[in-house]
Image: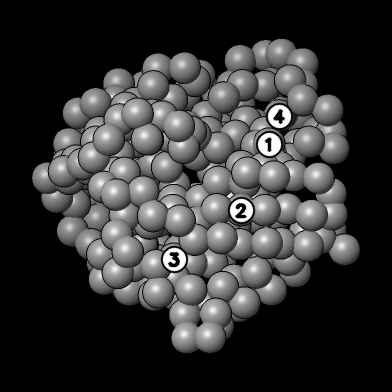
Amino acid sequence: MHSGFVSLVGRPNVGKSSIINAACGRKVSIVSDKPQTTRTRVRAIVHRTDAQIVFVDTPGIHKPVTALGKRVNATAMEAVREVDISGLVIDATMPFGRGDQFVADRLNIKESFVVVNKIDATSRAKVMKQLSAVASLDALAYFPVSAKTGEGIEPLMDWIAQRLPPGEALYPPEVVRETPDMLWIADLVREELLGRMRDELPYSIATRVTEYEWPRIRCEIIVERDSQKGMVIGKGGLVLKEVGTAVRLQLAKGAHIELAVVVDDGWQQRPDRIERLGY
């Protein structure tokens, strides 16, 4: 039996959360096509007969322009220092560039593995070109995968299981994620909003559950400006109604979601606000 912690790191939007969801066979981390969807570390547990793999999903590492950006970068790098093995995730549809190298330089890459994700979205020739480009990193192993179709996920999991140190399971078999329900529900609300918002607004949104007494759940949606409030609410409250319905369908039967939109001027640039929101 092997057990231990594995972090996946990379630029924003390379599919780290999607890979972890595919590995777990269920949704344990929110996903969207917006960069910086993941803002905190999320632990997801894969139970196998030969190993227990605890994935640590991390925010995308990028050049920060806000206090929030600096904080999520620090969160990602903290995760790398606290795990047994790390993997660099890159996008098969995009050339290996300075952003990828920036992340690789912050890993002990010779003791890490590389995952080339989204192979379903490009040609085999381009996948091979990407693998050739990253070969110079001299990592332990390289895995072309598709989080969307599941191709390549099982060989990756088999390899990770054997690289982890010997040890007993760290979590009971019924635990699949180490995220408090209040944080999980807040993330589900933000995920649904990300799918409906455009331009810069997704980065100005934060969510937090302020009241939790099952089945009643109250979640605040924080924006930075008064002008953003109406966009989040939608005409006649339509956006909030759609978000509340979509989140409720992902929770146990009977859940009642109450959403409220509040303005916290420039919260992304204020470290005290960022800390209060749990980032």
Q: Are marks 3 and 2 in contact (CB under 8 Å)?
A: no
| Labels 4, 1: front one | 1
- Report the mark closest to the observer, 4 or 3: 3
Q: Earlier in the sequence, mark 2 or mark 1?
A: 1
Q: Quadrant of residue 68?
A: top left
Q: Residue at x 50, y 56 (%)?
A: 221
Q: In the picture shown, does residue 41 fall above or below 245? A: above
Q: Nearer the viewer, residue 105 or 206?
A: 206
Circle 1 sits on which residue?
Answer: 180
- Vertical comparison of 127 with 99: above or below: below
Q: Quadrant of residue 66?
A: top left
Q: Where is residue 218 shown, x and y percent of the image?
A: 67, 53
Secondary structure of the residue carrying numbered label 4: strand
Q: Quadrant of the C terminus?
A: top left
Circles 3 and 1 in contact, beta carbons < 8 Å: no
Q: Which residue is mark 3?
A: 194
Please tell me whether residue 181 is drawn above or below residue 73 in the rendered image: below
For disc 4, the marked residue is 52
Q: Quadrant of the N terminus?
A: top right
Choose between 13 and 252: the one closer to the eye.
252
Nearer the camera: disc 3 or disc 2: 2
* Disc number for residue 219: 2
